[in-house]
Image (tube, grey):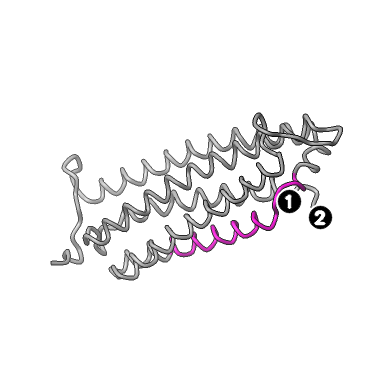
Amino acid sequence: MPPVADAVVLSRQFDDAEQQRSAADLGIWIFLATEILFFGVLFAAYAIMRIRYPEAFAVASRLTSVSLGSINTGVLLTSSLTMALAVRATKLGARKASIALLSATLALGIVFLAIKGTEYYLDYRDHLVPALNFSHPGPQAGQVEIFFYMYFFMTGVHSLHMIAGICLVGVMIAMAARRAFSTAYYTPVELSGMYWHLVDVVWIFLYPLLYLVSRS
C-alpha cells in the first residue's frame, strides 16, 4: 500500500513535523557551511600559489585536458538539473518520475567519475603526477609540479565528495522504491539535493581555476 499523501515520518525525538523539519534544515546548513570552509582553505591556498607563481600556473594549466574538463562540467550541470527535477517530482508524489530522475543523477555522477579517471590516466601517461612520475622539461618544473599537487588534491577531494553523493542518491532511490516518501515527507531527497548542488558548485569554481588559466 502506498503511503497516505499527507503522512509524515516523525522521529521519536521530535515533538512535531515542524520541529523535525527545522532541525533537518539547521543540520544541513551547518554541514554545508563546514564543507564550504574546508574547500575555502583549498581555494585560498591555490590563490596564494597562483599569485606567487603566475607564469608557472599558466603553463601548467595548459597541460590539463580542457576538453575533458569541459565535458565533465556539462555532465555535472546536467546532473544538477536532474537532481532538482527529482526533488520536485518527489514533492509532487510522482514516485516513478522521482526514481527515474534520481537514477539519471546517479548515472551522470558515475559518468563524471569515469571521465575524471580517464583524465587521471592521461595525466599519468604524460608524466604529470607529482611524487610518482612527474617530469617537465621547462625551467619552472618545480612550480608546475606545485600546480599539479594542488590539481590532484583538489580534484581528488572533489571526487571523494562525488562518490559520497552517488552513494547518497543510491540510498534515496532505494527509499523511493520502498515508497518511503510522500508529498508531506520528502526531506531526505531535498537535503540530498542540497549536498549534490554544493558538490557541483565546487566544481564550477575548480573548472576555471584549474583548466582555464591564461587560455584566452
Tell me where the magenta segment starts and ends, as one range: 61-84
Foreground residue among 158 and 46: 158
**Residue for badge 1:** 212
Foreground residue among 107 and 38: 107
Q: What kind of element bears circle 2?
A: loop
The quadrant the N terminus occupies is bottom left
> Does residue 143 sit above or below 201 in this rendering?
above
Marks 1 and 2, how far apart in space?
A: 8 Å
Q: Residue at x 79, y 36 (%)?
A: 136
Q: Which residue lies furthest to the right in this view?
A: 139
Q: Is residue 5 left or right of residue 78?
A: left
Q: Is residue 72 left or right of residue 94?
A: right
**Residue for badge 2:** 216
The quadrant the C terminus occupies is bottom right
Residue 52, image x, y percentages: 79, 31
Inspect the magenta stretch and tell me whether residue 81 lies in it: yes
Cβ–Cβ under 8 Å for marks 1 and 2: yes
Residue type highlighted by circle 2: Ser
Q: Is residue 14 left or right of residue 201?
A: left
Inspect the magenta stretch and tell me whether residue 78 lies in it: yes
